Image: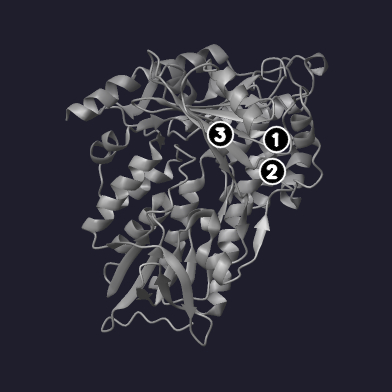
């Protein structure tokens, strides 16, 4: 592959596909590579719509907008966006007292309570009857419970990390406008065939409109089709279907209630789980399920019943998911981003995060001039580890479930193919009462999810000895005073306003 960053010769980068992946890639490349002599062009077909399954993010999305100098007041109202403190998982566990748990985003104040939570969780797995449910130890959980926004008063110096909920179609439209201001050329066309040179690199795209669009480098954001990376370059695909059973989803909207939550809710249903995401104008709802365990019609009926919309005149959208990743995200002179590179079901809203990670890493290699075979292989290994590590954390939700009401949940728990070696070591460590934090770092799994996330998952699911096997702490155990912890967190929360109020002020500015 011949690539040069010669400032005297303009290099043309062609992005195939719009949606969140295409326009986010365009914005990152245009802003981060503006010092180079680049021409950026995005080709988008009117015949192909965007998937838009996920309407939630991790805190990384804030970093993305910060890098573009885009304020929340600028983009959030245009995308019906709300704040996201974290995720509540309901009914994944049937353990008494652990039927629901909250996965928080980090806060500076966690430095005060996180060590107490970890100590109690460690004590409980070793048989002591102490409080170890994660919800009582994190400010973020309290904010979500009270429908508060994760934006403190100006004189409260403790930052809370947060994500967002948004309308995926509106976000794509906003990013499209932003990319245009950064100099990205937009062209409406449908790719019909692809021309390659003697080195096997992509040379040009031939469109149904009869145009030949040449380029030096191509970014495949064509969705699950993988038009360039898979269909043309023949890059192999590593399926996660043996790890994760879900391969379909059905989505529909519903009206908002009187309150405006600041969290995503994931509720376990018979053959999968339902998401509930609050936007400023509606709830986004969906059911991610296994097609091997129920039909699309059965899933839609269960979702409607779950939402109280069984007879409502609300249209539903059915989606198929291709879960897994390509072996090479950067192959020849093509980078795959978004669904074309891979997809892990939206349980932890990691889709946009993986897009950001992939493009940011590519920019790092590219600006250093590292794009030979050796560096492409290194790049691909790093992205693959990110995908596989994220997959392992998602798998753990299913492996630790304690439901027994359907074959789906029993199959998810008993699946012998879903455990990687590092994940197996984590389970052995937890069940053996070892130091989970040390094991997470030893297995290098904190590169994908931090230590607190693993503790929240295992403790939140109630993976502890049965209550009748727990023993009192004893005089030397010095158990923590939970009333003082509750009081500390509730007093800290006084520095945060209601979610609805903060969003209303945002629009008024």
Q: Residue at x 35, y 58 (%)?
A: 28
Q: Are marks 1 and 2 in contact (CB under 8 Å)?
A: yes
Category of crowding for the residue at label 1, using alpha-carbon neighbours closer than 10 angstroms: few (below 14), some (14–19), many (at least 20): many
Q: Nearer the viewer, residue 67 or 204?
A: 204
Q: Is residue 432 left or right of residue 295?
A: right
Q: Is residue 392 left or right of residue 152?
A: right
Sequence-wise, the earlier of marks 3 and 1 is 3
Sequence-wise, the earlier of marks 1 and 2 is 2
Q: Nearer the viewer, residue 466 or 338?
A: 338
Res 379 visible: no
Cα distance between the residues tagged 3 and 1: 20 Å
Q: Is residue 124 left or right of residue 347?
A: right
Q: Is residue 376 left or right of residue 61?
A: right
Q: Which residue is mark 2?
A: 244
Q: Nearer the viewer, residue 250 or 153?
A: 250
- Kindly state the secondary structure of the residue where label 1 is placed: helix
Q: Are marks 2 and 3 in contact (CB under 8 Å)?
A: no
Q: Residue at x 53, y 15 (%)?
A: 308
Q: Residue at x 68, y 54 (%)?
A: 239
Cα distance between the residues tagged 2 and 3: 17 Å
Q: Which mark is residue 250?
A: 3
Category of crowding for the residue at label 3, using alpha-carbon neighbours closer than 10 angstroms: few (below 14), some (14–19), many (at least 20): many
Q: Nearer the viewer, residue 126 or 49?
A: 49
Which of the two discs, 1 and 2, sits closer to the camera?
2
Residue 398 percent across, percent down from the top left: 70, 35
Q: Which mark is residue 443?
A: none
Which of the two discs, 2 and 3, sits closer to the camera?
3
Residue 92 percent across, percent down from the top left: 67, 26
Above or below for 444 versus 146: below
Category of crowding for the residue at label 2, using alpha-carbon neighbours closer than 10 angstroms: few (below 14), some (14–19), many (at least 20): many
Q: Which residue is mark 1?
A: 398
């Amino acid at each position: 592959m011949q690539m040069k960053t010669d400032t005297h010769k303009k290099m043309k980068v062609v992005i195939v596909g719009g949606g969140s992946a295409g326009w986010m890639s365009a914005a990152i490349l245009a802003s981060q590579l503006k010092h180079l002599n680049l021409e950026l062009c995005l080709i988008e077909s009117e015949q192909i719509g965007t998937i838009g399954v996920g309407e939630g993010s991790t805190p990384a999305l804030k970093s993305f907008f910060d890098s573009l100098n885009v304020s929340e007041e600028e983009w959030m109202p245009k995308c019906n966006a709300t704040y996201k403190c974290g995720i509540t998982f309901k009914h994944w566990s049937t353990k008494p007292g652990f039927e629901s748990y909250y996965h928080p985003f980090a806060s500076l104040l966690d430095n005060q309570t996180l060590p107490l939570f970890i100590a109690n969780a460690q004590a409980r797995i070793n048989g002591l009857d102490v409080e170890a449910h994660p919800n009582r130890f994190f400010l973020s959980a309290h904010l979500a419970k009270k429908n508060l926004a994760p934006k403190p008063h100006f004189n409260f110096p403790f930052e809370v990390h947060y994500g967002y909920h948004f309308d995926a179609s509106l976000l794509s439209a906003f990013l499209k406008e932003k990319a245009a201001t950064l100099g990205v050329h937009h062209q409406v066309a449908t790719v019909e065939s692809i021309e390659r040179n003697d080195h096997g690199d992509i040379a040009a795209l031939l469109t149904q409109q009869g145009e030949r669009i040449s380029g030096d480098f191509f970014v495949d954001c064509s969705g699950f089709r993988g038009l360039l990376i898979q269909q043309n370059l023949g890059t192999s695909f590593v399926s996660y279907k043996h790890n994760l059973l879900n391969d379909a989803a059905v989505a529909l909207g519903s009206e908002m209630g009187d309150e405006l939550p600041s969290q995503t809710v994931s509720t376990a249903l018979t053959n999968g789980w339902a998401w509930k995401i609050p936007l400023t104008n509606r709830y986004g709802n969906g059911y991610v399920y296994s097609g091997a365990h129920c039909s699309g019609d059965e899933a839609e009926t269960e979702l409607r019943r779950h939402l109280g919309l069984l007879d409502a005149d609300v249209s539903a959208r059915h989606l198929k998911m291709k879960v897994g990743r390509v072996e090479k995200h950067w192959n020849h002179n093509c980078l795959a981003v978004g669904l074309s590179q891979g997809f892990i079901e939206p349980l932890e809203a990691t889709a946009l995060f993986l897009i950001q990670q992939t493009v940011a890493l590519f920019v790092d290699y590219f600006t250093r001039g590292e794009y030979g075979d050796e560096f492409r292989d290194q790049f691909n290994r790093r992205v693959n580890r990110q995908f596989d590590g994220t997959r392992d954390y998602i798998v753990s939700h299913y492996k630790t479930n304690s439901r027994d009401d359907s074959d789906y949940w029993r199959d998810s728990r008993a699946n012998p193919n879903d455990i990687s070696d590092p994940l197996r070591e984590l389970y052995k460590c937890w069940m053996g009462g070892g130091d989970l934090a040390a094991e997470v770092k030893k297995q290098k799994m904190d590169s994908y999810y931090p230590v607190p996330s693993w503790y929240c998952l295992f403790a939140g699911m109630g993976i502890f000895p049965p209550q009748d096997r727990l023993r009192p702490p004893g005089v030397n155990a010095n158990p923590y005073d939970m009333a003082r912890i509750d009081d500390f967190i509730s007093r800290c929360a006084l520095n945060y306003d209601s979610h609805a109020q903060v969003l209303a002020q945002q629009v008024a500015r």
